[in-house]
Image (cartoon, helix red, strand yellow):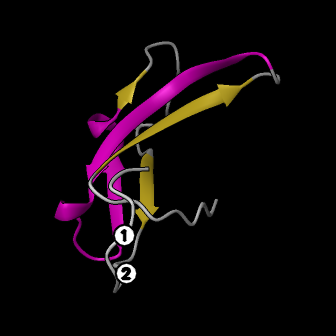
C-alpha cells in the first residue's frame, strides 16, 4: 500500500494485525535510517525482522520498502 509520507532520520515501522476495530496484535517491526538508504528500494528478509513468536511467516517472506530522495530538505525534524 502507498503511504506517501515524507520521513527523515530514524523511522520505526510497526505492523499489526487487526482482528476487529478494538482487537489488534503486533506482528513485526523494523527500523530504517534515511541517511543510510541506497537506491530506491530496501528489501528486508525475515531473519532481519523482529517478529512475534506466535505468528508464522513463509521462509521466503520479505518486506520491500520503496523510497525516493527529495530535492528540498524536510521542514520537520521528526514525524
Q: Secondary structure at mark 2?
A: loop
- Cβ atoms at labels 1 and 2 below 8 Å apart: yes
Q: Which residue is mark 1?
A: 74
Q: Is residue 26 above or below residue 42?
A: above
Q: In the figure, is residue 39 to the left or right of 29?
A: left
**Image quarter of residue 12:** top left
Q: Which residue is mark 2?
A: 70
**Image quarter of residue 40:** bottom left
Q: Residue at x 43, y 14 (%)?
A: 53
Expressed as whole percent of the image width and height from the top left, the position of residue 37 reads 23, 65
**Image quarter of residue 35:** bottom left
- Quadrant of the image containing the N terminus: bottom right
Q: Which residues are magenta?
A: 22-49
Q: In the figure, is residue 43 to the left or right of 21?
A: left
Q: Secondary structure at mark 1?
A: loop
Q: Is residue 52 above or below residue 49?
A: above
Q: In the figure, is residue 61 to the left or right of 37?
A: right
Q: Residues within 10 Å of mark 2 (few under 14, many from 20)?
A: few
Amino acid at each position: 500500500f502507498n503511504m506517501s509520507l515524507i520521513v527523515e532520520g530514524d523511522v520505526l515501522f510497526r505492523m499489526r494485525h487487526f482482528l476487529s476495530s478494538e482487537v489488534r496484535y503486533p506482528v513485526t517491526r523494523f527500523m530504517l535510517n534515511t541517511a543510510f538508504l541506497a537506491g530506491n528500494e530496501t528489501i528486508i528478509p525475515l531473519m532481519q525482522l523482529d517478529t512475534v513468536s506466535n505468528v508464522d511467516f513463509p521462509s521466503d517472506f520479505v518486506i520491500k520498502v520503496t523510497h525516493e530522495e527529495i530535492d528540498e530538505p524536510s521542514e520537520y525534524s521528526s514525524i
